[in-house]
Image (cartoon, rainbow, N blue to C red):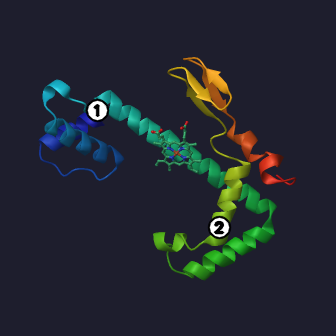
Amino acid sequence: MIEQREHAIKNGEPKTDDLLGLLMESNRRHAQERDHLQDASLTTEDVIEECKLFYFAGQETTSVLLTWTMIVLSMHPNWQDQARNEVLQVFGQSKPTFEGLSRLKIVTMIFYEVLRLYPPVVILLRQTYKEIKLGEFTFPRGVQLLLPIILLHHSREFWGEDA
Ligand code: HEM
């Protein structure tokens, strides 16, 4: 795809207005601005990796959140009614707009609660690149740290007895 698009750009065909097009355009401009000795532009391999990252980071997370939201709303018809009423109140029969989305208070509360209960990313991983002090602990270089988001989200200490 990248080669086809590079070919198309060389032939003066109009650019495609999507993520890959943006990455390639930014990369082309960046490469032109830097001198060749310290060229920090992306390779084709980098562009492919960036696209994969956006796909997994953006697609998986969002679809997991929406799936859990449908499940949880079906478990709690009372909240489903409140969410539906709010959407109808804010948008009526017209198409949703970005400005309107920020006025959806109940829907936002529901998303936050579903993200707390069923976070699409359940752990965060980090690795120390040098000796580092965290609170009362000192970790040497090369230690892997795992932050269990799912456990924090269900902690009674932070969220109360009905966590
Ligand atoms: C409900 C939706 C989402 C959730 C729960 C979510 C969650 C996260 C989390 C927890 C991280 C940090 C990972 C880490 O540092 O180890 C992250 C990073 C990232 N997310 Fe999302 N995300 C969501 C939606 C999206 C969307 C829609 C996009 C792009 C269209 C996106 C792109 C990214 C990227 C590029 C990173 C890496 C940032 C970096 O460290 O350079 N995410 N996301």
Dot 1: element? loop
* Number of residues whose C-alpha sits closer than 10 Å to that of mark 2, classed few (under 14), some (14–19) or many (20 or more): many
Q: Please report whichever mark, 2 or 1, sits nearer to the chain's N-terminal start.
A: 1
Q: CA distance from mark 2 to mark 1?
A: 39 Å
Establish if 25 lies above or below 42: below
- Where residue 154 sits in the image (x, y, percent)? 78, 46
The residue positioned farthest toward the front in the image shown:
136
Dot 2: element? helix
Judged left or right of residue 102, residue 67 is right
- Where residue 87 sits in the image (x, y, percent)? 62, 75
Name the residue type under label 1.
Leu
Q: Residue 122 appears in which quarter of the rendering? A: top right
Q: Judge by depth and name the residue closer to the eye, 9 or 147.
A: 147
Judged left or right of residue 68, residue 92 is left
Quarter occupied by the N terminus: top left
* Number of residues whose C-alpha sits closer than 10 Å to that of mark 1, classed few (under 14), some (14–19) or many (20 or more): some
Q: Residue at x 63, y 51 (%)?
A: 65
Asked whether residue 97 appears in the rendered view, the answer is: no
Residue corresponding to mark 1: 42
Establish if 87 lies above or below 54: below
Q: Residue at x 15, y 39 (%)?
A: 33
Residue corresponding to mark 2: 107
Name the residue type under label 2.
Val
Numbered label attached to residue 70: none
Q: Residue at x 47, y 42 (%)?
A: 55
